[in-house]
Amino acid sequence: MTHTKQPSPTPARRRTLCASAALVLAVAACNGDDAASGSDSATSTATATATLSGTDSATASASGASDSATTTASSGTESDSAGVTSATTTDGTGASASETVGSTTSDEIPYCGDDPPKGYMGAVNQDCENEPAVGMFDPVVEWQKTAWDVAPGYNQVMMAPIVADVNGDALPDILYVTYAGGGYLSPGVLRVISGDGQTELLSIADKGVLGSSGLAAADIDDDGMLEIAAVTGTAEVTVFEHDGTVKWTSPSLVGHVVYPAMAAPAIADLDGDGSPEVILGRAILNNDGTLRGAGMYGTGAPTYGSASFAADVLNDDGIQEVVVGNALYDPDGNAYWYNQMPDGYPAVADFD
C-alpha cells in the first residue's frame, strides 16, 4: 500500500507507528509537515517483527514517504517458546528507541523430582525423564599422595574415601583411613587432606578406627563445622570434631552391625527435627551418641560390612527411613515391613 503525505494542520511534527504482532501485521504511519517550505526534512523508519511459533512470522516496515507491510505465515506445530517482538525508530535527530519482550528457551537441564530444593528457581521435570548424558569416561590424575608426615608406615587404603569441607575453608577435603601392611582389619589412621593434595589437615591414630571401615561427615551439632563419624573394632561409633578431638563414642553395637571392620556409618536427620541421627547397621543413634532405637531384622549386609542408609522411601512429608537389605525401619527402629528374604546390600530407585 502507499500513503500520500497530507498537509499538517499544525506546525508540530507528528509520527505514529502502530504495530500488532499477529498472523496479520498492520502498520499505520503518519508524517506531518513541520518545515516552513512545506517539505518534511526528517525521515522516519520503523520495523516490527513478531514470531508466534517456530513457523509463523510477520514483518512490517514504514518510512516517511511510503508504508509497506508484508505478512508471512506458514502452518506448523505451535511450540512452547515465547515470541519476541522488537521495534526500532530512528528520526532525523539521531534518537532511537528499541524494546524487546517475551523470552526464549534455553538448554537448562530441569530438576528431576517432585519437590525441588528450597529456593530453586529453575525448571522442574516431575516425571523424571531426563535423558542421561552418555559419553566416554576418561579420568586424568591431578595429583596423588603416597607419603605422610604422621605415621608414614600407614600407607595402604582399602575403604572408599569421602569428600567434605572439614575445616570450613570452602575447599573440599578428602577423608579416608589408612593401614599398615596387610592389617586392614586392624586399627588404622584416620586422615584428612586438603583438596590440593598437599596439606595434611588431620592424622588421627590410636583411636581404634578400623583400617577398612567407612566414614561419614556432617554437622551433627549445628555449630557450623563438620563432624566425622568412624567405626571401631568393637562395633562402636566414634565421632570426631573438625579438629580431630573426640566428641563422643557410642555404646557397642554388636548384634546390630555385621562385620564392623568393613561397615560404614551414615548420617541423616530422619525425623526432620534439625538434629541428625547416626546410623550403623540397624542401630540408630541420637546426635549425642545415645542409642535411639534398633531394628529387629536386616543390618544392610549379607556377610561383610553393613551398608544401611537413610532415604525418604515412603514419601511421607520429609520423614526418612532406614533402608537395609530386607526391611525398612522408621526413625526409632520399628519395621515398616520385612520381606522375610535374606539380608543384603540395599539400594533405592524410582523405576516407574
Image (spheres, rainbow, N blue to C red):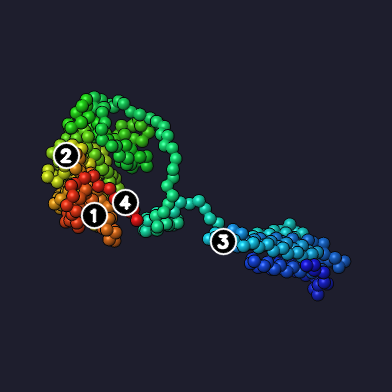
Q: Are marks 1 and 2 in contact (CB under 8 Å)?
A: no
Left or right for 197, reference 215: right
Q: Splitting the image into 4 quarters, where does residue 48 fall?
A: bottom right
Q: Are marks 4 and 2 in contact (CB under 8 Å)?
A: no
Considering only order in the chain, which callout, 3 or 2, is on the residue closer to the N terminus?
3
Q: Which residue is mark 1?
A: 321
Q: Secondary structure at mark 1?
A: strand
Considering only order in the chain, which callout, 1 or 3, is on the residue closer to the N terminus?
3
Q: CA distance from mark 3 to mark 4?
A: 36 Å
Q: Which residue is mark 2?
A: 259
Q: Secondary structure at mark 3?
A: loop
List x then y, in percent, for residue 107: 50, 51
Q: Is residue 165 above or below residue 59?
A: above
Say what amino acid the circle numbered 2 marks: Tyr
Q: Are marks 1 and 4 in contact (CB under 8 Å)?
A: no
Say what amino acid the circle numbered 1 marks: Glu
Q: Nearer the viewer, mark 3 or mark 4?
A: 3
Say which residue appears at 27% left-offset and 43% top-offset.
217
Left or right for 208, reference 31: left
Q: Which residue is mark 4?
A: 349
Q: CA distance from mark 2 to mark 3?
A: 61 Å
Q: CA distance from mark 1 to mark 4?
A: 14 Å
List x then y, in percent, for residue 144: 35, 29
Which of the pair 87/245 is nearer the observer? Answer: 87
Considering only order in the chain, which callout, 2 or 1, is on the residue closer to the N terminus?
2
Q: Nearer the viewer, mark 4 or mark 2?
A: 4
Q: Is residue 95 visible?
A: yes
Considering only order in the chain, which callout, 4 or 1, is on the residue closer to the N terminus?
1
Q: Secondary structure at mark 2?
A: loop
Q: Which residue is mark 3?
A: 77
